[in-house]
Every structure is written in structure tokens, then in C-alpha cells.
Amino acid sequence: MKIIFLAIALLFSVYAHADESARLSKISQIVEAQGLQQMFQQQLDQSKATAADVGQSLYQKMLEESGITDGQKNPKLEEVFTQYLERCTSMFTAKELVATWSSYYGKGLSEADLDKILAYYKSPVGKKDVHASQVAMARFSQAMAAEGQKRMNALIGQLMADLNSALAK
């Protein structure tokens, strides 16, 4: 009797593994059809550019507020700051973001749902949808980066004023 129970348990285990493998394959195909890795990479590239701009702005403000003129810049300090920003902007890769996203995607979807979603993204209109999303994401990221830079500059200015005020007391 125990042998039959173990055989049935093993059969269900193999079936469940095969079923999960099929789900992961479909999710992987959906991710590829959606162009998620490219979109995540696009966002990461834009974030790096924005971080560099914000970082440079912050660095310049710090120099100005401390009374250091352009001629007195410290190349070693600037290099340290640049390395810090590079480390901050390389915390994730597009591949890592895709893997994390994929681990959450489709938890409430059936196999039939995944099949229909995959069919949509492989269809002509689905491909147009992906392209439209990629174009929109590029423009959206640029617009948000520009607006974020303006807002960050204001926040940095306020931070420096607050710090100077606190130090003067």
C-alpha cells in the first residue's frame, strides 16, 4: 500500500513540475513578446542619465555652497562622487528586473489565460501594441526625467538653504 501511495505522490510531483515548467515557458514567451527586457533596459539607461544629471547638479551645488570656485575643483573628490553615482545606477540589470517581474506575473492566470495573452502579443495588433508601448516609454521617460531634474534642482536648493540655516544657528 505504501508503494502505491509513493508512486502516486511521485506521479503528481512530476506532473506538477512539468505543469510549472510549461507555465514558466509561456511567461518567458510573453515577456519576450512584450519586449520587457528592452523596455526595462531603456528605463535603466534613462535612470542612469537622470542620476548623472542630478548628481552633477548636486555636486555643483555642494561646491558652490561650500565656497569652492570652478578653479578650485578637486578631481579626486569629483571622481569619488562619479563612482558613487555609477554604483547607484547599476544596482539592477534589465535581466534581473525581468526575472523578478516574471516571478510575480501570472499568479492568478490560468494556462488558457496565458495562452490567450501570448496569442495576443504574437498577433499583428499585439506587436503594434508592444511597439507603441516602447515608443511611449521612451518619450515618457525623457519627459519625466526633464521634469524630475527641475524638481530635484528645487529640492537640492531647498536642502542647501536648510542646511546653511541650521549651521548658522
Image (cartoon, grey):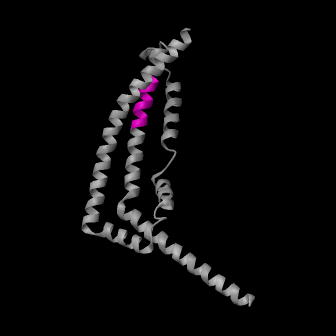
**Up-down: is 30 above or below 74?**
below
Q: Residue at x 49, y 44 (%)?
A: 90
In depth, the one of 19 and 59 nearer the eye is 19
The answer, for residue 62, to whether it is visible in the render is no
Quadrant in which the C terminus is drawn: top right
**Magenta stretch: residue 55 in it?**
yes
Q: Residue at x 74, y 91 (%)?
A: 1
Q: Quadrant of residue 13?
A: bottom right
Highlighted range, magenta: 50-59
Left or right: 8 with respect to 144? Answer: right
**Magenta stretch: residue 86 in it?**
no
Left or right: 154 with respect to 104? Answer: left
Left or right: 87 with respect to 5? Answer: left
Toward the right, the furthest residue is 2
Q: Could you say where residue 27 lies in the image, as x and y percent from the top left?
A: 44, 67
Q: Quadrant of residue 6?
A: bottom right
Q: Could you say where residue 79 lies in the image, as x and y percent from the top left?
A: 50, 30
Tag count: 0
| Secondary structure character of the magenta stretch overall | helix
In depth, the one of 98 and 48 nearer the eye is 98
Q: Could you say where residue 14 lies in the image, as x and y percent from the top left?
A: 59, 80
Q: Could you say where residue 85 lies in the image, as x and y percent from the top left?
A: 49, 35
**Up-down: is 146 above or below 115?**
above
Toward the top, the furthest residue is 169
**Up-down: is 115 above or below 138?**
below
The answer, for residue 88, to whether it is visible in the render is yes
Q: Residue at x 37, y 49 (%)?
A: 42
Q: Residue at x 51, y 39 (%)?
A: 88
